[in-house]
Amino acid sequence: MKRYLLIGCLAGASFFFGCQQNAGEETSRSTAREKEKTAKELEMYQPSELAQLMRRMYEENLALRDTLLAGKLPATFPKNFQRIHSAPSTSGEHEEATFKALAQRYTRHYDSLKKAPNPRAAKAAYNGMVQTCAACHQNYCRGPLGKIKRMRISAAEL
Ligand code: HEC
């Protein structure tokens, strides 16, 4: 039981700890001892406000994707995503001009997604938004890039 819990944690960690590493690889290569160490570090890890916001953006945008794929428009959009402009990050990226410009681009795409008149237009706007997640992550935090790319809606489903 304990063992499964640990593995569960690590599976999460390989993604959520994603900024500096290639998600997934680390876990399979590390020894049991290293895993114990990682589990301890995990307990102490306090994600920044921006990191927590990013996790919600990931989850909620995946839910939004399901809605769009079901041919519907979402009834509401989360408001807290505006915090991307002000939430403090682990390494101070949020204070850099490049980050600010990319965050603006993200918000613009998110706004056009909100205004999309039909599911088809919304899907295209959604892909534009995912593109801005990826653009910022090319610069700042490459770990989650694979997951972000898989958020896209394929041409066949548009
Ligand atoms: C303007 C830049 C920018 C945009 C846009 C952006 N991110 Fe991030 N993201 C970051 C930075 C910087 C971090 C690292 C935060 C930290 O560790 O404090 C991060 C961290 C993350 C993390 C890891 C959080 C953790 O647990 O450590 C995930 C997952 C993530 N982003 C997903 C997304 C998704 C999905 C989108 C689009 C819906 C997105 N990001 C858009 C800059 C961005």
Image: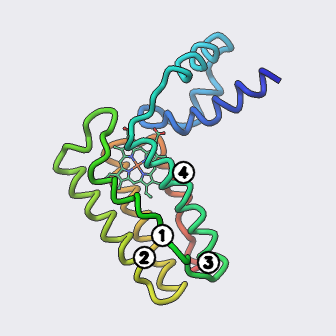
Q: Residues within 10 Å of mark 4 (few under 14, many from 20)?
A: few
| Residue kind at label 4, given as amino acid type | Lys
C-alpha span from label 1 to label 2: 10 Å
C-alpha span from label 2 to label 3: 17 Å
Q: Secondary structure at mark 2?
A: helix
Which residue corresponds to the image point at 36% horizontal and 74% vertical from the top-left? 111
**Nearer to us in this view, 68 or 131:** 68
Q: Secondary structure at mark 3?
A: helix
Marks 2 and 3, the one that precedes in the sequence: 2
Q: Is residue 122 left or right of residue 27?
A: left
Q: Residues within 10 Å of mark 1 (few under 14, many from 20)?
A: some
Question: Looking at the rendered structure, which numbered label has been put on residue 77?
Answer: 1
| Residue kind at label 2, given as amino acid type | Leu
Q: Secondary structure at mark 1?
A: loop
Q: Is mark 4 within 8 Å of ligand 1?
A: yes
From the image, state whether disc 4 or disc 1 is nearer to you: 1
Q: Which residue is mark 4?
A: 147
Marks 1 and 2, the one that precedes in the sequence: 1
**Nearer to us in this view, 13 or 111:** 111
Which residue corresponds to the image point at 50% horizontal and 47% vertical from the top-left? 55
**Do the CB atoms of the residues marked 1 and 2 lie less than 8 Å apart?**
yes
From the image, state whether disc 1 or disc 2 is nearer to you: 1
Residue situated furthest right in the rendering: 1
Q: Residues within 10 Å of mark 2 (few under 14, many from 20)?
A: many
Marks 1 and 3, the one that precedes in the sequence: 1
Q: In the figure, 133 relative to 34: above or below?
A: below
**Residue 35: image x %, image y %?**
63, 18
Q: Which residue is mark 3?
A: 157
Q: Is mark 1 within 8 Å of ligand 1?
A: no
**Do the CB atoms of the residues marked 1 and 3 lie less than 8 Å apart?**
no
C-alpha span from label 4 to label 1: 22 Å
